[in-house]
Amino acid sequence: MADTVELKKNLPPVEEPKKEEKGLSEDAITKYTSAGQALGEVLKKFIPTVTAGKKVLDLVIEGDKLVAEAVAPLWNKAKNGVKVSKGSAFPTSISVNNVVSHVSPLPSDPEVVLKEGDVVKIMLGIHLDGYAVTHAETVHLAKADSKTSDLAADVIQAAYDAAQVAMRTIKVGNKNWDVTEAVEKVAKDYGCSGVEGMLSCQHLKDVTDGKKRILLNPSPELKRDHETATFEEGEVYGVDILLVTGPDGKAKPDPSRTSIYKKADINYQLKMKTSRAVFSEIQKKAGAFPFTLRALEDEKRARMGVQEAVAHGLLKPYDIVQTAPGTLVAEFFFTIALLPAGPLLLSPQPFWYSADKVKSEKSISDEATKNLIAQPLRAPKKKKAKTAAPAETKA
């Protein structure tokens, strides 16, 4: 008698291959966009609290708290027994006037209080499963019911317009130097310049300092040291537009000590017990992304422990620099993906900026640049023409 075949036997499920957007899976795009939406909710709550009289320390602590609250309800279901990593992709930093970026003080640092007239740069980021979205924008603490004008208006409008131009220049087939030149062209129209040597990098999963890079206002030496890169479909970039008033974009070290560090891809056996304990805590809490020493349990021990790790290249400090006294720096940072349907802005739109708040007497002179900014970032989908129904034939 022939063997009977059990037709109802459960077969192992066949996994359908995930659709790829040329280097980006649907899962990656979903996590990027979810991180951006969560960041947008944080900004709605946080930006209105950045006002004259507030302490920078209190604000950065609040910003980090809002980020933690925003990611708490997201992606809590474990996959194959592994929880999705999530949290800060960049600690809240608040840098004022001619201080360029990366200010995220500790309780022991000198107190900084915001005052009327300050130009305030705010930066923070969120990652979901290693897919990071970072955002920065500039707020001017103008007098109540008054517009932002003069140098503050020039540099904020210049940085905003330069960011809009950069978004539209980062497209498949263009080169990194195309962005460098486009940003500097806008800056000059407003009597500003790029802060020399500021970097923007390609983003990958768990990586925010990829090999393809964009430089602002590079010196000849810096330009020589960086390769030409061509933008390709499926890539993601974090783009940092930092402009300063005046023709000199040079920056020098600020006396403030940074509290922001990032692990480097280097192996070294730390000798000091404190250094090893601090580095172990960093590995557990920060993972691949920049972190602030405020996230560690003991501030004094953390300050001591990072010194050996920095000396041997295990940690990279995010240095604080400043431009010349009397100058003002504005910043807009955006995260963008290059998809088949066109560029997709992953980070939120700036919350504070609007054209009716900022009144510069200067403007872009080049018509082609004006036309570029007027174009939508992503071309609208063309509607398919309706085909006429075939005429009925009568018998």
Image (cartoon, helix red, strand yellow):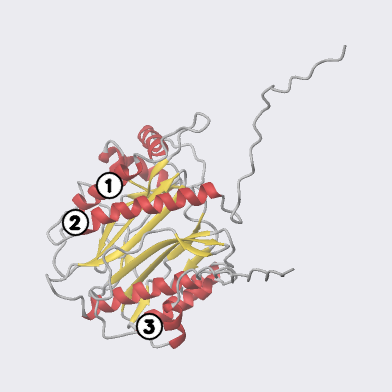
Real-space Cα separation, disc 2 to disc 1, in angstroms: 12 Å
The residue indicated by pointer 2 is 49
**Residue 79, horizontal then vertical, whole percent:** 50, 33
Of callouts 3 and 1, which one flags the residue occurring earlier in the amino acid sequence? Answer: 1
The residue indicated by pointer 1 is 66
Q: Which mark is residue 179?
A: none
Say what secondary structure mark 1 lies in: helix
Near-viewer residue (336 or 229): 336
83 to 368, vertically: above or below: above
Say what secondary structure mark 2 lies in: helix
Q: Residue 188 carries which label?
A: 3
Residue type at the position of mark 3 = Lys
**Residue 367, horizontal then vertical, whole percent:** 44, 87
Quarter of the image with the C terminus is bottom right
Q: In this view, does 317 lie to the left or right of 380?
A: left
Is residue 245 visible in the rendered structure shown here? yes
| Residue plotted at (35% across, 66% down) | 332
Of callouts 2 and 1, which one flags the residue occurring earlier in the amino acid sequence? Answer: 2
| Residue plotted at (26% across, 40% down) | 299
**Residue 336, horizontal then vertical, whole percent:** 47, 61
Q: Nearer the viewer, mark 2 or mark 3?
A: 2
Residue type at the position of mark 1 = Leu
Q: Is residue 218 left or right of residue 124?
A: right
Q: Give the residue furthest to the front.
A: 395
Quarter of the image with the N terminus is top right
**Residue 3, horizontal then vertical, whole percent:** 83, 15
Q: How crowded is mark 3: few (under 14 residues within 10 Å), some or many (20 or more)?
A: some
